[in-house]
Structure formats: C-alpha cells, structure tokens
C-alpha cells in the first residue's frame, strides 16, 4: 500500500526545460491522468517515473524506498507505449509471457500466467494468433496483458488509445478503467484528450509548459479551475475582462456580482464562464444581465450552441435541446444572465492558451 511521491522533479534537455518543479503524490490504487497540450512535458514526466529518463533534479519515492537512481528494469513498473511496441514475430501468448521467460519463470508456469491475463483482457481465444492478424483494440489488450505479466507495482501508459478509432477508444477507456479498478493497481496514463482523462481518472494532473497547473479529482478540475489556463483547457469557457469596483466586476459599464471575489479595489481581472452556465431561455433572475444579439446558431446532437455579440465581447451559450427548445433567429435581440456562482475570476495577467 505505497504511494508514489515526486518531489521537485525537473528535466532539462540542454537549454529546453521540459519539466519544472513537479511535486505530486500518486495515491496507491488510484488512476491518475497526465493531461495537457502537445509539448507540455507529460511524456517526459512519465518516462522519468518509469526510469527511462534521469531527472535533472528532484526525487522519486515509492513508500519508503527512494527510486530516483534505480534503473527502469529494477523498478517493477509495467509500461504500455503509444504504438504498443509488441514483438511481431511472436504470437499473442509468447508476447505476454516473453518477460516472464527472460526472468527465468518455467515455461509451463509462464503459459499458465499468460492465459490468466489473456482471460482478464478477453483474448483467450487469440493466444496462438500472430500480432499482425489482430485489430488495433486487440493489440492494445495484448500490450496491457504483457505489461501486467510481471505483476508491476505501478502501471504506466503513454497515450494508450491514440492508435484506436473514436468508438473503440471510448469502449477501451471503460474497459481499461474497469480492469484497473478490479486489480487495484496504481496507474498513470498520459493523454491529451480531456474526455479520456475525465472518463478514466480518479485524479487529473493538468500540465502546461512543463509545470503542473492543477491536480485533483476531475469534477474539481472542471468546476473549480484554479486559473484561466485550466478553465480554457478543460471544457469550454467564454472570457471577458473587467476591473474590481465596489466588490463587483465592472465590465463594459456593467457591474456584475461574483460569488467569491478575493481582489483589491481597482484590480484588473479576467473572468471565465462556461457556455452551459449562461442563462438565455425562460425568465431570467434579476442582476448580472447583459443585452446580446444572436450571430450564429448550431445544433450539435443533443445540445444547441448560440453565439452572441454582447458588450462584454462574444459569448457562446450552450443548452440541452429538449422538445420545448425555442428557435433563435439571426440578429435577434436577447438578454443573458451570468449567474454569480458561474463566474470564475482570475488576475488579468493569467494567459488564455487558445488566444495565444
Ligand atoms: P506530446 O503530447 O506532443 O507527446 P508531451 O506533453 O508528451 O507532448 P514531451 O514529449 O514530454 O511533451 O516534451 C516536452 C518538451 O521537451 C518539448 O518541448 C520537447 O520538444 C522537449 N523534449 C522532449 N524530449 C526531448 C529530447 N530527447 N531532447 C530535447 N528536447 C526534448
């Protein structure tokens, strides 16, 4: 029952700082997703955890054991790579027991173990198949079974779904999550896909430019984003700028209330609000109302997006398309309500990634 603890982990490649000052505790038995845009340092961090890269600074501990200088093959960590890295000249069973046989496990025992694992990933019927004769999803399951063969203490996966098509990816996310829960194995998954992270993870590490922006359960990351980067990267957000006046946000001559405002008078702020939390339909509550004009409407399956031009700038409103959803004409004058609780307020200096 050991947690994996990272302290002050840094990685420099020459002048490139790929990972900077990472302090994280991966709780025993939990699945954590490392999430962030391309180049933010997710893979480098995972490879340092695996022992495939040496940190430039910092330490890594599993329970009471310092692993910082322990080489990869002595860490007892299982790893699944983006391209699965299976041996094409071996069949499914041989792929799964390869490492056991190298470790000196008797062939009969190794085969028995391989069958248990193939059962677990529902591939028993494919034990004699060549790797080339498997689908992408089946290959991924072989890679998972192979990584679990040595009963790793920590299970690491680098973009495990990226080679799969969209439908299969969703099914495999659920399968992998169920398997991980059944085994109770501490697991770390690198992904750039927020839905994947939300589907599978107990906790999410949101990274940008080598740093941890936020670490916590998916619902906290979504509903309590700590900065503008996280608000924008996870889910969708409208942004507008304002200034603190009399404990309200003054923006384009409107005074908006926010549930919490920990800023001094006159401080410039950047405000985020999620499209599904802006009210447009029905009777609007008093206060925090802004006039708007409809510029674009689009139905996306079960939801409708309405783009509005407002004094605060462009806002997108999203709502579920029920039977009574009313139509909006282009150019129509409307009013929106921005609930005080839905306004996330940050210092104006907080960068918005999508505006970069
Ligand atoms: P992606 O999602 O695109 O795989 P990532 O978040 O996994 O990206 P990393 O691969 O960890 O990002 O890279 C982080 C930074 O370190 C990038 O700027 C990358 O160019 C740099 N980097 C990674 N590996 C090396 C290396 N071997 N030599 C020099 N720079 C590297």
Image (cartoon, rainbow, N blue to C red):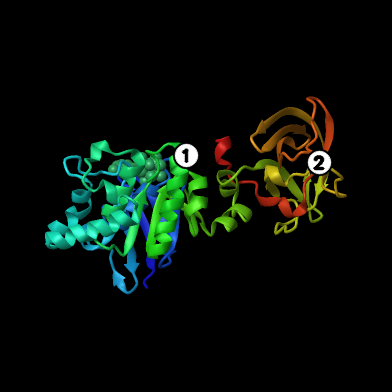
Q: CA distance from mark 1 to mark 2?
A: 33 Å
Looking at this view, name the residue that lies furthest to the front: 125
Disc 2 C-beta below 8 A from ligand 1: no
Which quadrant holds the C terminus? top right
Please tell me how crowded label 2 is: few (under 14), some (14-19), or many (20+) other residues with Cα within 10 Å. few
Toward the top, the furthest residue is 330
Mark number, residue 281: 2
The answer to whether mark 1 and mark 2 are in CB contact below 8 A is no
Secondary element at image label 1 = helix
**Res. 180 image quadrant:** bottom left
Crowding at label 1, few (<14), some or many (≥20) Cα neighbours within 10 Å? few
113 or 189: nearer the viewer: 113
Residue 119 x/y as whole percent: 31, 56
Q: Position of residue 226 (x, y in %)?
A: 59, 55
User: Residue 16 vs residue 37: left or right?
Assistant: left
Location of residue 136 with respect to 5 vertically, above or below: above
Image-quarter location of ligand 1: top left
Dot label at residue 167 = 1
């Amino acid at each position: 029952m050991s947690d994996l603890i990272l302290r002050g982990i840094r990685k420099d490649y020459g002048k490139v700082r790929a990972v900077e000052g990472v302090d994280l505790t991966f709780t025993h038995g939990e699945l954590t997703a490392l999430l962030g845009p391309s180049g933010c340092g997710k893979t480098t961090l995972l490879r340092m955890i695996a022992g495939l890269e040496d940190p430039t600074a910092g330490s890594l501990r599993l329970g009471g054991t310092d692993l910082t200088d322990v080489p990869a093959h002595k860490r007892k960590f299982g790893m699944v790579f983006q391209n699965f890295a299976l041996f094409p000249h071996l069949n499914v069973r041989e792929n799964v027991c390869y490492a056991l046989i190298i470790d000196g496990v008797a062939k009969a025992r190794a085969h028995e173990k391989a069958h248990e694992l193939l059962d677990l990933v529902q591939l028993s019927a494919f034990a004699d198949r060549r790797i080339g004769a498997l689908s992408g999803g089946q290959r991924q399951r072989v890679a998972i079974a192979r990584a679990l063969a040595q009963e790793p203490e920590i299970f690491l996966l680098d973009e495990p779904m990226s080679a799969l098509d969209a439908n299969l990816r969703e099914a495999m996310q659920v399968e992998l999550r169920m398997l991980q829960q059944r085994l109770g194995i501490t697991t770390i998954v690198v992904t750039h896909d927020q839905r994947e992270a939300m589907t599978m993870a107990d906790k999410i590490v949101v990274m940008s430019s080598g740093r941890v922006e936020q670490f916590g359960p998916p619902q906290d990351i979504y509903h309590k984003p700590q900065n503008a980067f996280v608000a924008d990267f996870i889910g969708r957000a409208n942004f507008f700028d304002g200034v603190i006046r009399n404990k309200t946000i003054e923006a384009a001559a409107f005074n908006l209330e926010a549930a919490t405002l920990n800023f001094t008078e006159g401080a410039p702020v950047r405000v985020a609000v999620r499209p599904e939390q802006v009210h447009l339909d029905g009777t609007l509550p008093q206060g925090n109302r802004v006039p708007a004009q409809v510029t674009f409407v689009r139905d996306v399956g079960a939801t409708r997006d309405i783009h509005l031009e407002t004094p605060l700038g462009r806002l997108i409103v999203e709502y579920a398309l029920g039977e009574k959803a009313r139509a909006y004409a282009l150019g129509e004058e409307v009013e929106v309500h921005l609930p005080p609780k839905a306004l996330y307020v940050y210092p104006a200096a907080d960068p918005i990634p999508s505006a970069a």
